[in-house]
Image (cartoon, rainbow, N blue to C red):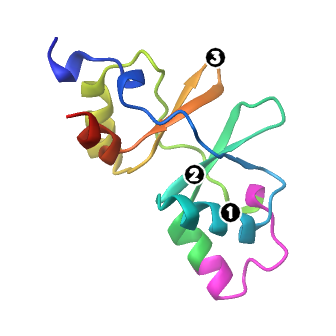
Amino acid sequence: MVAEQLPVNYAMTTQVVPLQMEDSLEKGFKVIQMYGIPAIPVIDKEGKLAGMVYRNDLDVALLSNFGKGMQIKDLMEKPKSVLSPWDSVGAAIIEFKDKNVLVLPITEDGILKGILTPFDLLMKA
């Protein structure tokens, strides 16, 4: 099978530590820093994807004290793209390029199942 035809569940990271909407920006910064990724998914109480928080936004909010006392829900954005575990690696590559993202949330029926980064794809190559 050609790599671009493989489903993203072949390469996605399933052990994700998502943020909750009520988490502090400080916690979000610590999680992103710990895992070394540029963005992290935010879930609601049912485990459904609610948004994404980006490292750059956290940096600006925390370094300027703009984000003092804010919660993740105040800074999260709607995901630029969402894939299912059964979408192809080729579709993911297109999304990385066209949407200019480095982290794609992977959901099934709205429930977060993992994330996919270009690094994940390189590790499986």
**Which residue position is annotated with label 1?**
28
Q: Are marks 2 and 1 in contact (CB under 8 Å)?
A: yes
- The local secondary structure at tag 3 comes to loop
**Residue 65 lies in the magenta-colored region:** yes
Q: Quadrant of residue 57?
A: bottom right
Please name the residue shown 31% across and 47% down the image.
119
Is 21 located above or below residue 74 in the figure? above
Cα distance in 3D space between marks 2 and 1: 8 Å
Q: Residues within 10 Å of mark 1 (few under 14, many from 20)?
A: many
The amino acid at mark 2 is: Ile
Q: Is the residue marked by circle 2 packed among few (<14), some (14-19), or many (20+) residues within 10 Å?
A: many
Question: Which mark is drawn over residue 40?
Answer: 2
- Nearer the viewer's eye, disc 1 or disc 3? 1
Question: Residue drawn 36% across and 30% down?
Answer: 11
Residue interval drawn in magenta? 60-73
SS label for mark 1: helix
Q: Is 9 positioned to the left or the right of 22 in the image? A: left
Magenta stretch: includes residue 102: no
Marked residue nearer the N-terminal end (2 or 1)? 1
Given the image, on which type of amino acid does mark 3 rest? Answer: Asp
Q: Earlier in the sequence, mark 3 or mark 2?
A: 2
Residue 109 has which mark?
A: 3
Q: Is residue 100 left or right of residue 4?
A: right
